[in-house]
Amino acid sequence: MSADVELDRVTIRFGSFTAVRDASLKIAGGEFFSLLGPSGCGKTTLLRTISGFLDPSEGSVRIGGEDMRGIEPNRRPTALIFQNLALFPLMTVADNIAYGLRVRGVPRAQRMARAAELLSLVALPDQGHKRVSELSGGQKQRVAIARALAVEPKVLLLDEPLSALDLKLRQHMRNELRAIQKRVGITFIYITHDQGEALTMSDRIAVMNHGVVEQVGTGREIYADPRTPFVASFVGENNGIEGRIASVDGARAAIDTPLGRLVGRRGEGAAAGRAGTIFVRPESLRVAAPGTDAALAAEIVSTAFEGSTTHVFLRAASGQALTMTVDMREAATLPAPGATLRLSCDEGEAIVLATDGKGA
């Protein structure tokens, strides 16, 4: 069983400080939905409001169509996995998993049978007798998930549960979490500041900044078509070149920059005369073919080898820093640092966004 979650113009204040402002979201039942943003953007505050540990100052939270105002956390169809997991070190793994059932008065034989089922679900069969201290970091994560699932929530809330793990284990656990979510079919709402986690696991993502939801969409939509300069800069690497928008023509926009006039897709708010930024992903920059018009000239400062890709750090005559990402074959043909390259980018792979803060 899963439930949809709806936030209707939720605002959360602490005294004179507004932590979340006018947030509206509709999360479908069975969806893996991530709240992505930097520390302090309000995403954990929003999660605690869904779970019932905070009440909204304005607006409402509905789960399965029911308004949650006044309903305590233990009476909501949710379970929360904390960042520190909060497992009980003196209990066995099975007792940890069955703890919520024990509180609800479920007989021991029944709750131990349920714990065994969940251990199999999270790929930890025959581990129920161990102490938590005997488990690896990834195994502890799975025990925390199993404990949360034991009480059969309709919505599972996860507050940066992978942040304490090393990179290799985090990457492995992304796949594990997604696989578990697909098996159990309940709604997952996942908090993270790690864009890789959000892009890898989520059906949809809400990007937050200073308490405001700036964009909601699939990972591919947010990466390819950011609606705000913050989203363009925060989700994935991006080259942002500032200037003034010279003209717009249908879906295209031209912008005058210190590197010359550049053209890209017309993004949110782009209009002639407005301050703007053209954003170009590093993988969209390439060495220009001979005779290519409107190519950028930039000097190679350094390179960083990352196995299948190499990052090339460049500087234009204006001082603008640029990054280009190339594959192994292209990297082998690059000249040494100090050489000047002419770079190009297809118009469709760059986007021009207004940055002067005015309405569109």
Image: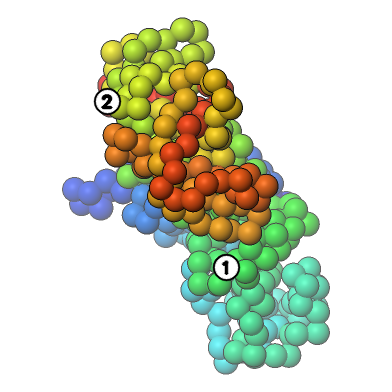
Q: Residues within 10 Å of mark 2 (few under 14, many from 20)?
A: few
Q: Residue placed at 61% from the left, 45% from the top? A: 333
Q: Residue placed at 42% from the left, 32% from the top? A: 297
Would you say 292 lies left or right of 52 here?
Answer: right
Q: Secondary structure at mark 1?
A: helix
Residue 295: give x, y in percent of width and height.
47, 25
Between 34 and 303, the one lying in front of the other is 303
Residue 160: give x, y in percent of width and height.
50, 62
Q: Is residue 52 above or below residue 274?
A: below
Between 349 and 308, the one lying in front of the other is 308
Distance (Cα) linking label 1 and label 2: 38 Å
Would you say 195 lies left or right of 255 here?
Answer: right
Residue wearing tag 2: 356
Q: Is residue 324 above or below residue 270?
A: below
Q: Is residue 277 above or below residue 272?
A: below
Residue wearing tag 1: 167
Screen quadrant of the C terminus: top left
Q: Identify residue type, mark 1.
A: Leu
Would you say 336 lies left or right of 134 here?
Answer: left
For marks 1 and 2 on the same chain, the one whose residue lies earlier in the sequence: 1
Q: Identify residue type, mark 2.
A: Asp
